[in-house]
């Protein structure tokens, strides 16, 4: 069987007219410049079908192209090149889609739950090292006002389970926020104390942060951020990063709700009214509406998304008619509220 | 047959040496399956999707007597991206820690210097990435069994990119046309097809005028607006309709933005016509014929399609842009096929990793 075609030899751009005879799995190609060559059909790959020609290439010779025109294609003797990509071509599109969905779902599930499984096994000493490094970042901004730290420590003791070691500090930075850091460290920003209307409001915020530490949310968040978060952000591109964002959003909502539940229980046990905390959230929410988050420096709301539900849970947990004790005495509160005003010392 | 002419004016040859023969019906199944696979793989398939899209677009692009061929693979683009990320991501994360520590410990100067160095480094890498993306594309583009490429790593171009971009931007950006044209020449003069080097000698003639028009629009717009505002005020004082006056102001603002977009577009249209016309390789001179109205039609078409299809047409933007470029490309001259020999440049393995990391294109 002989057929017409043409050939590029991969060395020059010249197109050679070719007569091709196939015999016993070998192509004998006679070119119009007098050359003739033999190529095993098994060494060819099928590249594309054109109008009346089939185009073949040789993986071992770059740029080598043979077109067979008007003849029966070489068929099963040659390998087909990839369509969707090698793996997908091998198993078929729909199978591949099904497998990809299963793998992606498993990956997302693992990314979501992996930190929760692993967090309890992270050694406390590691966590403390990271936490100390982060707390060290606040360097000379810790406040040391007379009696303020004692008042804060006392409040923290009452709000945390016996035997837990916490390091709660107030930092002189003008944002309304509080953050739990690894290794039992809690940082309260001074502006939050100024915004708060009494010790009971601070007690609610503090109980919430302590709950984050107790439940190891901080460790979970770190594992998430530096393992799957980074991986998904790196690989994901458009679709992946959006899913990653949803995932972390879902996580913080869940953790926030859990921390609130624990905080409400803590306040009840300490006999401190939850109503002021609810009032505090309410006030921040109104300020945010009026000024916007950036204008009012209310970072608290961006890390602790506010919802009507959140305020309601605290409000409803109050026992009607019960007279609660104040979280701190008047003197203690004054010392705490003024912790950054009577001079900050460098450590 | 060893002397293949292109050409304008010859009988059997169509009017342009370039022709796009693809159809949207042919491309639709490719686009749909690409979208599906990209979604179910959390975006990882996008490298293979790009390879499939290019394989189709190149195969439907005819130059003189044969179509182009794209031989880049999704696997190599994926690996290129992973390698770049493996280097950049730890550096970025580490520096973020250092930066936070410095800033909060009050080392403002050190932090500022670090930020400066960081952005400077990124700036440089963007230049390198632009070079390498073009080099990669040429090295995977075949015609008549011959490919393009470059032996330059683009490291020096990165420096030129930083220097000339800054030089273009100072003086209120007045030298931007010079920096764009000169960087085009720097880049293309380092590229080759087969064993023939590209030559680019674009000049800024006429470009500065268009560029200055961009500055003129706000000035004229401001004056017109002042007059209009004064007129409206006078009209209102004279008991005119305030809604009319307000409407006029709104129209003026919209008109101002439209004029600004048109003038900017006309600069870019002229820029691409000019640089393409000054670029040649292997005896072929190129030309790009798209005028401002063609660009406007392309962009409005893209936006309109995306809106009408609720974003689904995003899959077709690459297709539309490529066919736009090919339809407006012309070439004149004679290729001596005997003398067009295989490229000896190293085929780069990094694909478009760096460009992907910064999310930038090649042209």
Image (tube, coloured by chain):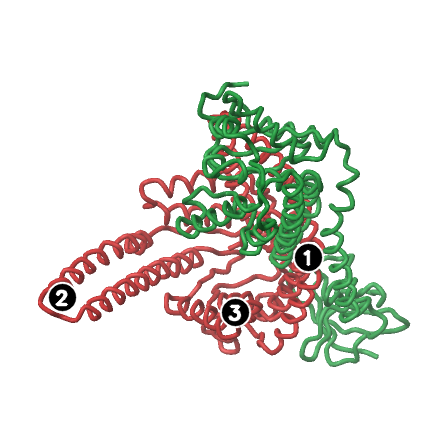
Chain colours: A green, B red
According to the picture, the residue beneath numbered tag 1 turns out to be B44
- Name the spot of residue B44 as percent of width and height, x first: 68, 57
According to the picture, the residue beneath numbered tag 3 turns out to be B320
According to the picture, the residue beneath numbered tag 2 turns out to be B236
Callout 2: 10 Å neighbours few (<14), some, many (20+)? some
Asked whether, in this view, residue A85 is left or right of residue B112, the answer is: right
Distance from disc 2 to disc 1, alpha carbons, whole Å, reads 61 Å
Q: Earlier in the sequence, mark 2 or mark 1?
A: 1
Marks 2,1: beta carbons within 8 A: no
Distance from disc 3 to disc 1, alpha carbons, whole Å, reads 24 Å
Does the image show residue B103? no
What is the quadrant of the N terminus of chain B in the image?
A: bottom right
The chain to which mark 3 is attached is: B
Q: Earlier in the sequence, mark 3 or mark 1?
A: 1
Asked whether, in this view, residue B198 is left or right of residue A113, the answer is: left
Distance from disc 3 to disc 2, alpha carbons, whole Å, reads 49 Å
**Do discs 3 and 2 share a chain?**
yes
Judged from this view, the residue extending furthest toward the right is: A24
The quadrant holding residue B209 is bottom left
- Name the spot of residue B325 as percent of width and height, x first: 49, 65
Callout 1: 10 Å neighbours few (<14), some, many (20+)? many
Assign a secondary structure to mark 3.
helix
- Name the spot of residue B40 as percent of width and height, x first: 70, 63
The quadrant holding residue B140 is bottom right
From the image, state whether disc 3 or disc 2 is nearer to you.
Answer: 2
Assign a secondary structure to mark 1.
loop
């Amino acid at each position: 069987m002989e057929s017409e075609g043409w050939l590029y030899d991969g060395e020059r751009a010249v197109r050679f007219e070719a007569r091709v005879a196939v015999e016993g799995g070998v192509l004998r190609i006679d070119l119009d410049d007098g050359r003739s060559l033999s190529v095993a059909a098994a060494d060819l790959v099928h590249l594309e079908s054109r109008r009346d020609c089939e185009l073949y290439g040789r993986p071992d010779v770059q740029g080598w192209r043979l077109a067979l025109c008007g003849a029966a294609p070489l068929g099963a003797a040659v390998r087909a090149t990839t369509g969707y990509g090698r793996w997908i071509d091998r198993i078929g599109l729909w199978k591949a889609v099904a497998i990809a969905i299963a793998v992606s779902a498993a990956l997302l599930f693992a990314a979501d739950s992996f930190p929760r499984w692993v967090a309890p096994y992270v050694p406390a000493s590691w966590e403390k090292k990271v936490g100390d490094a982060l707390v060290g970042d606040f360097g000379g901004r810790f406040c040391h006002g007379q009696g303020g730290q004692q008042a804060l420590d006392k409040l923290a003791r009452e709000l945390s389970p016996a035997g837990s070691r916490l390091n709660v500090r107030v930092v002189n930075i003008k944002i309304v926020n509080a953050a739990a850091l690894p290794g039992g460290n809690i940082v309260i920003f001074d502006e939050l104390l100024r915004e708060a209307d009494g010790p009971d409001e601070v007690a609610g915020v503090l109980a919430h942060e302590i709950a984050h530490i107790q439940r190891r949310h901080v460790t979970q968040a770190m594992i998430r951020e530096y393992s799957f978060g980074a991986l998904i952000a790196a690989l994901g591109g458009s679709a992946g990063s959006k899913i990653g964002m949803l995932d972390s959003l879902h996580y913080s909502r869940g953790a926030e709700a859990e921390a609130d539940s624990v905080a409400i229980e803590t306040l009840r046990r300490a006999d401190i009214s939850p109503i002021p905390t609810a009032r505090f959230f309410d006030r921040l929410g109104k300020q945010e509406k009026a000024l916007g988050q950036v204008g009012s420096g209310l970072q608290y709301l961006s890390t602790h998304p506010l919802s009507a539900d959140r305020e309601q849970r605290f409000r409803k947990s109050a026992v009607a008619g019960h007279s609660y004790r104040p979280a701190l005495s008047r003197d203690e509160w004054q010392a705490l509220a003024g912790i950054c005003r009577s001079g900050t010392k460098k450590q | 047959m060893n002397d293949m002419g292109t050409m304008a004016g010859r009988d059997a040859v169509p009017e342009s040496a370039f022709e796009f023969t693809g159809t949207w019906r042919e491309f639709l199944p490719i686009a749909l399956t690409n979208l599906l696979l990209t979604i179910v793989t959390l975006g990882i398939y996008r490298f293979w999707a790009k390879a499939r899209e290019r394989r189709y677009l190149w195969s439907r692009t005819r130059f003189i007597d044969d179509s182009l061929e794209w031989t880049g693979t999704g696997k190599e683009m994926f690996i290129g991206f992973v390698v770049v990320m493996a280097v950049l991501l730890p550096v970025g994360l580490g520096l973020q820690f250092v930066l936070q520590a410095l800033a909060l410990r009050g080392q403002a100067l050190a932090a500022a210097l670090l930020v400066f160095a960081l952005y400077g480094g990124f700036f440089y890498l963007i230049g390198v990435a632009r070079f390498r993306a073009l080099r990669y594309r040429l090295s995977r583009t075949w015609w008549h069994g011959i490919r393009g490429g470059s032996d330059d790593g683009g490291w020096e171009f990165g420096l030129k990119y930083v220097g000339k971009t800054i030089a273009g931007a100072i003086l209120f950006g007045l030298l931007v046309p010079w920096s764009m044209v000169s960087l085009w020449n720097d880049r293309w003069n380092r590229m080759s097809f087969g064993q023939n080097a590209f030559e680019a000698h674009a000049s800024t003639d006429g470009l500065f005028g268009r560029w200055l028009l961009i500055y003129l629009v706000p000035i004229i717009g401001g004056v017109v607006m002042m007059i209009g505002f004064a007129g409206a005020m006078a009209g209102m004082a004279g008991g005119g309709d305030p809604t009319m006056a307000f409407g006029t102001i709104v129209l003026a603002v919209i008109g101002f933005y439209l004029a600004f977009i048109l003038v900017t577009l006309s600069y870019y249209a002229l820029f691409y016509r000019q640089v393409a016309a000054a670029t040649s390789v292997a005896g072929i001179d190129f030309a790009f014929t798209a005028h401002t109205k063609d660009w406007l039609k392309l962009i409005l078409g893209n936006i309109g399609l995306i809106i009408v299809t609720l974003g689904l047409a995003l899959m077709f933007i690459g297709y539309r842009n490529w066919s736009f470029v090919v339809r407006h490309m012309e070439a004149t001259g004679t290729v001596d096929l005997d003398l067009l020999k295989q490229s000896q440049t190293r085929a780069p393995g990094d694909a478009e990793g760096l460009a992907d990391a910064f999310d930038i294109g090649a042209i």
